[in-house]
Image: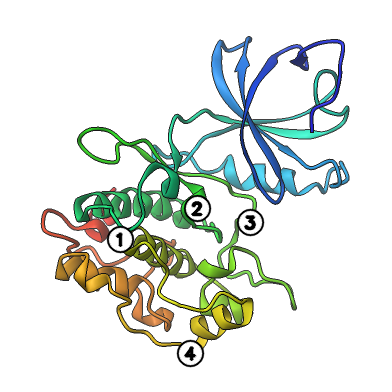
């Protein structure tokens, strides 16, 4: 991705330090911002994506910059390279630098204790509550997009990242195209129906299931078998009842209910509606989200 250049600084401002990760759209680098004197993360798309005003990164920044919440990685600004180690004209996003790692790397799926599962649920739900209240659906909730900073007392801060697939509430995928990761795609998204925040809740239910049991609740590995499970496969608990307290297990199963009307409700503004429901032994995640 990087190229030889006369200056190691991108646009005479950002010193690229290391690669944090690669994705379908491009790469994320840690960098030192010598203007604001802080570490940042730079999201840089692949060279194959043509630059221009309609670049997907522009739409991502428009959505991401609207969301400001302690459990969401902050999008500071968007730039376009004029000099330095990435090709001239390449757009890039300047993001908050987070010390955490993706959930499946920061934790050991299958060995995550119930208190940690509950705390991750609570913090991600708070993030989603804010995202949905902005009229957006994230559409790509998965372990790689949930950053966790473990501490001795628990998961620490949890932050939702990557709004590359975010869409307005009520949008639907284009015919023949799926936005998101297939293992975490909601049935309504697969069927091309208009989506709302409950699609994100479905993905979160699967994520919590994976962290709790070490596996997703379907056995098939082919795209066809995964799609069949999402649409009409076995809705058993997949072993989660043996890993979590009954109340928390029931909540996770409800999040990943195939019929979205069986998932926790969404208020007209997008937020989780059920203030009274309790999750786990100590507090109510949904109630906490509604009060956040």
Answer whether residue 142 is visible to the viewer in this image. Answer: yes
Point out the image quarter for the N terminus. top right
Q: Position of residue 208 (x, y in %)?
A: 35, 61
Q: Position of residue 162 (x, y in %)?
A: 57, 46
Q: Nearer the viewer, mark 3 or mark 2?
A: 3
Pick whichever of labels 4 and 2 is earlier in the sequence: 2
Pick whichever of labels 3 and 2 is earlier in the sequence: 2
Point 51% across, 43% down: residue: 67
Point 24% across, 57% down: residue: 285
Q: Position of residue 263 (x, y in %)?
A: 35, 75
Answer whether residue 193 is visible to the viewer in this image. Answer: no
Question: Along the horizontal axis of the image, is 95 left or right of 150?
Answer: right
The residue tagged 4 is 232
For the residues marked 2 and 1, what is the alpha-carbon distance in whole angstroms?
30 Å
For label 2, count other residues whose C-alpha is less than 10 Å away and answer few (under 14), some (14-19) or many (20+). some
Question: Along the horizontal axis of the image, is 202 left or right of 244?
Answer: right
For the residues marked 1 and 4, what is the alpha-carbon distance in whole angstroms?
23 Å
| 1 and 3 marks in contact (CB < 8 Å) | no
Pick whichever of labels 1 and 4 is earlier in the sequence: 1
């Amino acid at each position: 991705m990087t190229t030889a250049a006369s200056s190691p600084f991108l646009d005479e401002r950002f010193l690229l330090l290391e690669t944090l990760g690669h994705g379908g759209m491009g790469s994320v680098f840690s960098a030192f911002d010598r203007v604001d004197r802080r570490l940042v993360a730079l999201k840089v798309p692949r060279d194959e994506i043509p630059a221009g005003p309609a670049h997907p990164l522009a739409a991502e920044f428009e959505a991401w910059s609207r969301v400001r919440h302690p459990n969401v990685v902050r999008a500071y600004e968007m730039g376009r390279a004029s000099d330095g180690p990435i090709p001239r004209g390449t757009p890039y996003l300047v993001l908050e630098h987070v010390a955490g790692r993706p959930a499946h790397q920061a934790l050991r799926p299958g060995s995550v204790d119930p208190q940690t599962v509950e705390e991750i649920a609570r913090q991600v739900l708070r993030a989603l509550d804010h995202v949905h209240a902005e009229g957006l659906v994230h559409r790509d909730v998965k372990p790689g997009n949930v950053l966790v900073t473990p501490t001795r007392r628990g998961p620490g801060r949890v932050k939702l990242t990557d709004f590359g697939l975010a869409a307005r509430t009520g949008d639907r995928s284009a015919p023949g195209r799926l936005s998101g990761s297939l293992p975490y795609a909601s049935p309504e998204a697969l069927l091309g129906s208009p989506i709302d925040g409950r699609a994100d809740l479905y993905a979160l239910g699967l994520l919590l299931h994976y962290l709790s049991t070490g596996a997703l609740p379907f056995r098939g590995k082919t795209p066809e078998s995964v799609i069949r499970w999402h649409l009409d496969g076995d809705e058993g608990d997949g072993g989660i009842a043996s890993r979590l307290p009954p109340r928390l297990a029931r909540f996770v199963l409800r999040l990943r209910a195939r019929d979205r009307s069986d998932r926790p409700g969404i208020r007209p503004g997008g937020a989780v509606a059920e203030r009274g429901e309790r999750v786990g032994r100590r507090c109510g995640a949904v109630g906490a989200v509604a009060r956040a």
